[in-house]
Amino acid sequence: MPRYRYEALEQELKQQIRSGYLKSGDRLPSIRKLCSHYELSKATVLHALHRLEADRWVQAQPKSGYFVRYPEQERPKPIRVDTPKVPAPVSVPAIFQDIMTRSAAFDILPAADQEDASSQLIVLNRLISRQMRHKPEQKSGYYDEPAGKASLRAALSDQFRYRQLMVSADEICITTGCQHSLFIALMSTCQPGDTVAVESPAFYGVLQIMEHLGLNIIEISSDSAHGLDVDELAEKLTHWPIKACVVTPNFGTPAGACLSDDCRKRLLSLATEHDFWLIEDDIYGDLAFSSPSTRPLKSLDNSDEQRVILCGSFSKSLSRDLRLGWILAGPLHNKAVQMKLITQLASPQAVQEGLAQFISEGHYRRHLNQFRLKLREQRDELINLLANNWGDRVLFSQPEGGLCIWVQLPESCDSQKAYRSLREQGILLTPGTLFSAHGLYNNYLRLSFAQPLTADRKKALSVLFDTLFATEA
Ligand SMILES: Cc1ncc(COP(=O)(O)O)c(C=O)c1O
């Protein structure tokens, strides 16, 4: 028998959670309702709730109340695959074009209803529209300066300070997105036939650029818990000279890991020792679930040589439709600006001005605070669903940021085959083979938690796993 009234309430709520009456993610009745229903004082109810929170049964959400927590998963085994030992030319699988023309690789149900735009996005639209109406004759008659609007570069420079990267606006060049920045980085550092080390699994956009530029790839294993294997890179460097290494230290897609500080430091010293460039893809850097957010690798690059070329964009943290990104190329800055000029001439002025104002007035930070909370909840919900339904057959990552989960299926599952049959049903799977230049990962897939897990998406996930398991040889 509980001795105190708060204990009685605590036990009652635990029982409701254990029995499934209150499910993961459910909101608990309000404090007022709990007081009147159980005839308790506010202090007693709050005491019980604080104890439940400390024991991780519930979670408080500012201004929303208390929610039942998702069960803690065991720390997953890192997902990792051995990579080929020798560099080779890149050949992107044909399925790539097919997926990109459907342009919805982050939603398994592209035809599903989308959520309404957030209030911050509406503000952004208003600011951009206002900039479009301001001096339209000037904008239609003149290109923007090659490096991009000074106001946006200054806003970005301030924004980077939150992540301990101190750079001036003059060191930044605006691009049409991270893909463009990566293209400029590889164009500025490599010649056809050069070898580039790339984390494996890799972002398929990098593989596509490398194929086009005639570069050779040496894949370096990157596991879902620790990221790029710096020991493997060091070992491969003793056999093969490389010109650059493309790495996503913060929540790379699809493996989702965050590289430790020690590995970052080792990576920097390897770059100096073996004379190669580090091309940092930081597109998910603003999407860390814990605060303060993680630093870019570039913020540790304090040597005179400046080996890190930082690439990023607003595509994942704000909107893909802005088509605005950046490159910080250090000593190669002028070359990068020249490449930008050749490939894009200039960036749209009103969009840059509107975005600069959005950042400098604090809307971007407010947007990130809400967005990261939402993503964390959506990640928990997806992980919960995977664990409860398919946990005995699949391994999956548990990223602390970013947008996706990397799923390992039984060895004989064929994700490309499932992709084709699911496509006919309007379900879009992102097969693992997209993430390697050597056809690795066919029994893997990337799942995104960028969209809320609606009933339709849950149903689609069931069909998706049934189809995948049916491909088992
Ligand atoms: C890791 C990574 N880098 C770069 C990009 C390309 O981004 P952007 O839309 O800014 O060109 C993506 C898009 O999916 C990505 O996942």
Image (tube, rainbow, N blue to C red):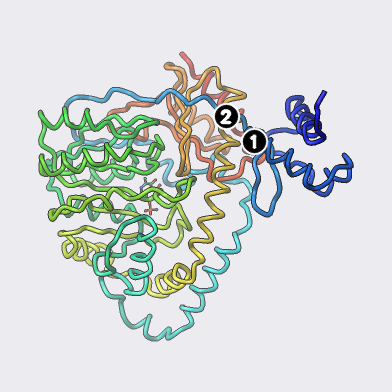
- Counting from the top left corner in percent of width and height, residue 200 is at 30, 33
Q: x%, y% of residue 16?
A: 78, 29
Considering depth in this image, is 7 or 409 the residue closer to the camera? 7
Q: Secondary structure at mark 2?
A: loop
Label 1 environment density (alpha carbons within 10 Å; few <14, some 14–19, many ≥20): many
Question: In the drawing, what numbered circle is on residue 150?
Answer: none
Residue that appears at 24% across and 48% down: 279
Query: In the rendered view, does 121 fall on the left or right side of 244?
Result: right
User: Residue 268's x, y, as percent?
Assistant: 20, 43
Q: Do the CB atoms of the residues marked 1 and 2 lie less than 8 Å apart? A: yes
Give the vertical position of 309 relative to 108 (above or below). Answer: below
Q: Is residue 350 above or below residue 262?
A: below
Q: Quadrant of the N terminus?
A: top right
Q: Is residue 196 left or right of residue 33?
A: left
Q: Which mark is residue 69?
A: 1
Cβ(mark 2) to ligand 1 < 8 Å? Answer: no
Q: Look at 46% across and 30% down and name the residue there.
A: 397
Whether residue 357 appears in this view of the structure is yes
Residue at x 36%, y 57% (from the top left corner)? 177
Q: Is mark 1 within 8 Å of ligand 1?
A: no
Residue 408 locus on image (x, y percent): 45, 24
Horizontal side of residue 256 vs 129, given as left or right = left
Q: Quadrant of residue 235?
A: top left
User: Where 55 sits versus 339, above or below?
Assistant: above
Point out which mark residue 72 bears: 2
Inspect the image, locate mark 2, and give the three-letter code of the amino acid beneath it. Glu
Furthest residue toward top = 473
